[in-house]
Image (cartoon, grey):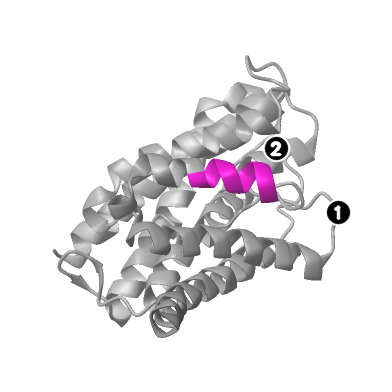
Amino acid sequence: MSLGIVFLSEVFGTAMLTLLGCGVVANVALRGTKGNSGGFLMVTWGWGVAVFAGVYVAAKSGAHLNPAVTLGLLANGAGEYAPDVPVDFASTLTYFGGELLGAFLGAVVCWLAYKQHFDAEEEVASKLGVFSTGPAIRSSSWNLVTEIIGTFVLVFVILTFGGTPSGLGPLAVALLVVGIGVSLGGPTGYAINPARDLGPRIAHALLPIKGKGSSDWGYSWIPVVGPLVGGALGGLVARIVPIIATAAS
């Protein structure tokens, strides 16, 4: 498979992920929507369905949709990211680039869908919250720990159950994301995906959103570094556990 196909697959899949994921946050957070004040459980299920759709769209490339998943596969010692896509420097950058661009584009389309509600919303935090995550209690070290743990669970379980998300199955990955959200999403809003947070945050900074306020770049490194560390750890531990189990038996 050509890297161009991989790139486009990840762009479209990650764009679908963030369009539907940011969309459910917009529906809950913005003034005057039909889903206003729908609550965190609605958000977690919306993100689960967003993952479900994104995995199907990007199935050809293995549907990573997330640099932490790509890095987790690398740390796990995978020979291929997807059938006929060898693990190397060029393919790794292709996945990262497609995921980031797709996340940005999905957020832009979400803004277009909710343009009038962004204009009507007065709270700058609600507007930013549609695009990117933020902590309930701001503490760089503990927020980082939360993101590491959540992403570790994501990557470790994916790799334990069947390799890439497309191999595991879209529904299983979607339910895993819902589970992480309701269990571990309270402190930080569970980015668990550097592209999901950084791409839409860049969109927030660039788009002509009425009264949007700051994009909170001071926090932005946490939902990037935390998931990358968690993803790498998830890949390493998923590689070690079978070796330990074999040795013990």
Q: Main secondary structure of the magenta part?
A: helix
Name the side, left or right, on which 155 lies relative to 7: right
Mark 2, Cα crowd under 10 Å, few <14 / some 14-19 / many 20+, is many
Q: Is residue 243 above or below residue 105?
A: below
- The image quadrant that residue 23 belongs to is top right
The disc placed on residue 137 is 1
Q: Nearer the viewer, residue 110 or 28?
A: 28
The circle drawn on residue 36 is none
Whether residue 222 sits left or right of residue 14 in the image: it is right
Q: Circle 1 sits in a helix, a strand or a loop, which is it?
A: loop
Position of residue 228 relative to residue 113, above or below, is: below
The reply to whether residue 106 is in sight is: no
Q: Which residue is mark 2?
A: 127
Disc 2 or disc 1, which is closer to the eye?
Answer: 1
Q: Position of residue 41 (x, y in %)?
A: 66, 31
Residue 207, position as x, y percentages in the image: 58, 44
Residues drawn in magenta: 176-184
Outermost front residue: 249
